[in-house]
Image (cartoon, rainbow, N blue to C red):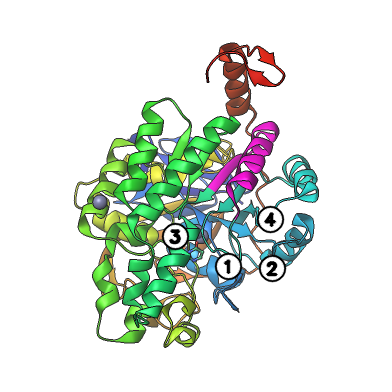
């Protein structure tokens, strides 16, 4: 049974052209004019693009005393509804827990996924067991990316010695380290200070995590990755200070990537001053929303290429769960949703306004991350041989975002009331039509794990260059003979 997407304009990260796309057995088999097939999907007036890849989700994750409310069933339904055909979720071992044991838990949960998925493995503690298991994870489990939290002191946070050790291990294994860059020590101090002064409401959340804590941690992680000989992917880059560090690193030739979230691009810190406690608390996430100055910086980064991928950090909590923090903002579970809205909101606020081009839209929602995570061109491409993960985007189809009609399991939407265009006419997940004109027909369990090999090319290049350029130290009793 073949399918043909007919009459549309193919838009990839670097090309825009009219062509039909033929699919057989879940992969693209032909691209060209006048193709025929058993089933025809009419794409007249639409753009045919690689399905979105959200590189940053937390589905059914134990966090801050509860579990994020969207699981792999509702989360991936939401993803498909909005044109995202692959999610990369964070496998989160508790400090002290075996990485392989945690992976079994994530394997079980993800069996319900309706779209394809992959995992990043979080490094929440350090020891010989973690060192050993990282090799198994990379070489046998199809995971080539490891996440490190510099925030969440006393819970998930790792210290600099652990960070350096893990980055070095990543470099050896051909894996890419990821970092949540906020200085957890300073956040803890500021939080205690704000609470002691009687600032208990959600508006204090942003003051507890100012741009400087993010800028400091981003700079630190970049320098430590450089010393360890590893590339670095900075998740949820939300401010100018962090972006600036990434930009400078890129100019110096470092392989560093930044990931703004759709929430930070569009929503600002005034949300935390809303008179309704629930409204403000629902928007508490880390890093917090910033002001327009920072938003402009993020948009500039997407246009210039100093920032690479737009994600969601989808970590959704119900209003009831958020209310755990009444009287103490630091107990409000951190996280917002966005999986269903990322593409239409970015299309509307980015492409429709001229801030980014259609091709840049494809690059930052799909192709760039597929390359960084080493699953391109299976994912992130409209090419013969690629998986038929495709969105047929109708630029004239509009809606007003509302929690009443969303697939996510929570009872509100942070983008509520925003009118968006660029909605999917069709969404295909490995050839299966999951959305037809807004109608969701997803299949729980259809999603497959996307195994990703080590990034051998980046790593070989890095270590070769290091070897060629490393100074030959002359050591005398272990002390450098010349000044450092
Ligand atoms: N930030 C959030 O807001 N939620 C989940 C984890 C994180 O880093
Ligand atoms: Zn984070
Ligand atoms: Zn600033
Ligand atoms: Zn996250």
In contact (CB < 8 Å): disc 2 and disc 3:
no
Left or right for 256, reference 8: right
Q: Is residue 457 visible?
A: yes
- Of residues 414 and 79, the one drawn nearer to the viewer in this rendering: 414
Q: Which residue is mark 4?
A: 125
Q: CA distance from mark 3 to mark 1?
A: 28 Å
Q: CA distance from mark 2 to mark 1?
A: 9 Å
- Which circle's residue, 2 or 1, is located before the other in the chain? 1
Residue 473 position in % (x across, y down): 63, 14
Mark 2, secondary structure of its residue:
helix
Question: Is 163 a magenta residue?
Answer: yes
In contact (CB < 8 Å): disc 3 and disc 1:
no
- Which circle's residue, 2 or 3, is located before the other in the chain? 2
Q: Examine the image and state in which quarter residue 72 appears.
A: bottom right
- Range covered by the magenta-colored residues: 158-178
Q: Which mark is residue 78?
A: none
Question: Is 256 a magenta residue?
Answer: no
Q: Which mark is residue 186?
A: 3
Left or right for 199, reference 311: left
Mark 4, secondary structure of its residue:
loop
In contact (CB < 8 Å): disc 2 and disc 1:
yes
Mark 3, secondary structure of its residue:
helix
- Which circle's residue, 4 or 3, is located before the other in the chain? 4
Residue 413, compared with residue 140, is above or below; it is: below
Q: Which residue is mark 2?
A: 109
- Which circle's residue, 4 or 1, is located before the other in the chain? 1
Q: CA distance from mark 4 to mark 1?
A: 21 Å
- Of residues 56 and 87, the one drawn nearer to the viewer in this rendering: 56
Pointer 2 residue Cβ closer than 8 Å to ligand 1: no
């Amino acid at each position: 049974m073949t399918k043909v997407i007919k009459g549309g304009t193919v838009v990839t990260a670097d090309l825009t052209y009219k062509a039909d796309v033929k699919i057989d057995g879940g992969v693209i088999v032909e691209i060209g004019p006048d193709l025929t097939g058993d089933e025809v999907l009419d794409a007249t007036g639409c753009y045919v693009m690689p399905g979105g890849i959200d590189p940053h989700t937390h589905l059914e994750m134990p966090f801050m005393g509860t579990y994020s409310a969207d699981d792999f069933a509702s989360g991936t339904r939401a993803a498909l509804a909005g044109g995202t055909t692959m999610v990369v979720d964070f496998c989160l071992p508790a400090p002290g827990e075996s990485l392989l044991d945690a992976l079994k838990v994530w394997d079980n949960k993800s069996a319900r996924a309706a779209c394809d998925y992959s995992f990043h493995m979080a490094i929440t503690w350090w020891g010989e067991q973690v060192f050993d298991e990282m090799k198994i994870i990379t070489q046998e489990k199809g995971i080539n990316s490891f996440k490190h939290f510099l925030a969440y002191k006393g819970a998930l946070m790792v210290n600099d010695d652990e960070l350096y050790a893990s980055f070095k291990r990543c470099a050896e294994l051909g894996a890419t380290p990821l970092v949540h860059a906020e200085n957890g020590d300073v956040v803890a101090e500021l939080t205690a200070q704000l609470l002691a002064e009687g600032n208990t409401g959600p508006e204090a959340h942003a003051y507890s995590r100012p741009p400087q804590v993010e800028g400091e941690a981003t700079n630190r992680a970049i320098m430590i990755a450089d010393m360890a000989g590893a590339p670095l992917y900075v998740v949820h880059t939300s401010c100018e200070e962090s972006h600036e560090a990434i930009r400078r690193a890129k100019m110096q030739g470092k392989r560093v990537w930044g990931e703004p979230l759709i929430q930070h691009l569009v929503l600002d810190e005034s949300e935390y001053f809303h008179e309704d406690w629930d409204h403000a608390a629902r928007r508490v996430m880390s890093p917090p929303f910033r002001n327009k100055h920072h938003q402009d910086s993020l948009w500039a980064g997407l246009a210039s290429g100093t920032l690479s991928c737009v994600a969601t950090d989808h970590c959704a909590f119900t209003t009831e769960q958020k209310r755990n923090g009444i009287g103490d903002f630091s107990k409000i579970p951190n996280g917002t949703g966005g999986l269903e809205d990322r593409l239409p909101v970015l299309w509307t606020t980015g492409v429709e306004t001229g801030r980014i081009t259609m091709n840049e839209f494809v690059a930052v929602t799909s192709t760039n991350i597929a390359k960084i995570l080493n699953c391109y061109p299976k994912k992130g491409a409209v090419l013969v041989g690629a998986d038929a993960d495709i969105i047929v985007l109708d630029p004239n189809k509009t809606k007003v975002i509302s929690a009443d009609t969303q697939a996510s399991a929570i009872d509100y939407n942070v983008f509520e009331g925003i009118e968006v265009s660029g909605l999917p006419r069709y969404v295909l997940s490995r050839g299966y039509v999951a959305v037809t004109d807004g109608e969701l027909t997803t299949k729980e369990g259809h999603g497959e794990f996307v195994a990703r090999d080590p990034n051998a090319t980046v790593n070989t290049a890095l270590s070769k260059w290091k070897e060629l350029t490393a100074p030959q130290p002359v050591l005398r009793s272990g002390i450098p003979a010349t000044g450092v």
